[in-house]
Image (spheres, helix red, strand yellow):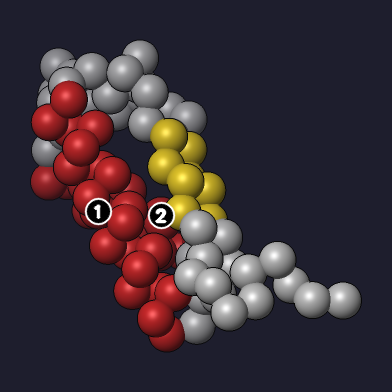
Amino acid sequence: MASPNQGEKPDLGIAVAKKLAKRAVDRNQLKRMIRELVRSAQTTNLNSDVVVKLKKPIGRETHGRLRNKEKEGLRAQIVGLI
């Protein structure tokens, strides 16, 4: 049985709800970071479709703003999953 992505690039789906990340700047920054991490993983060893969905709100302690400390924590979690 052939795989669905045989000979094609894997697909990437990203869902970051406005309810969980209030500022558009933060949502876009998260999406860029996720794309970068997944693409680097796909060039080395990951060859399947990926869907990333934010489930918990970000920026609770920083009044809705995504700070470097939170970005690094999210980056580490995503790298751990890939």
- Residue labelled with disc 1: 33
Q: Nearer the viewer, mark 2 or mark 1?
A: 1
On the rendered structure, is 26 left or right of 40? left
Q: Position of residue 55 (x, y in %)?
A: 48, 30
Q: Give the structural element (helix, strand or loop) at label 2.
A: helix
Q: Residue at x 24, y 32 (%)?
A: 27
Is 17 drawn above or below residue 37 in the view shown? above
Q: Residue at x 37, y 31 (%)?
A: 16
Q: Position of residue 49 (x, y in %)?
A: 57, 60
Is 64 drawn above or below residue 40 in the view shown? above
- Residue labelled with disc 2: 77
Instruction: Choose between 14 and 20: the one closer to the eye.
Output: 14
Q: Residue at x 12, y 31 (%)?
A: 25
Instruction: Choose between 50 and 5: the one closer to the eye.
Output: 5
Q: Position of residue 75 (x, y in %)?
A: 30, 55
Instruction: Choose between 71 and 46: the one closer to the eye.
Output: 46
Q: Residues within 10 Å of mark 1 (few under 14, many from 20)?
A: some
Q: Give the structural element (helix, strand or loop) at label 1.
A: helix
Cα distance between the residues tagged 2 and 1: 12 Å
Q: Residue at x 23, y 18 (%)?
A: 22
On the rendered structure, is 71 left or right of 38? left
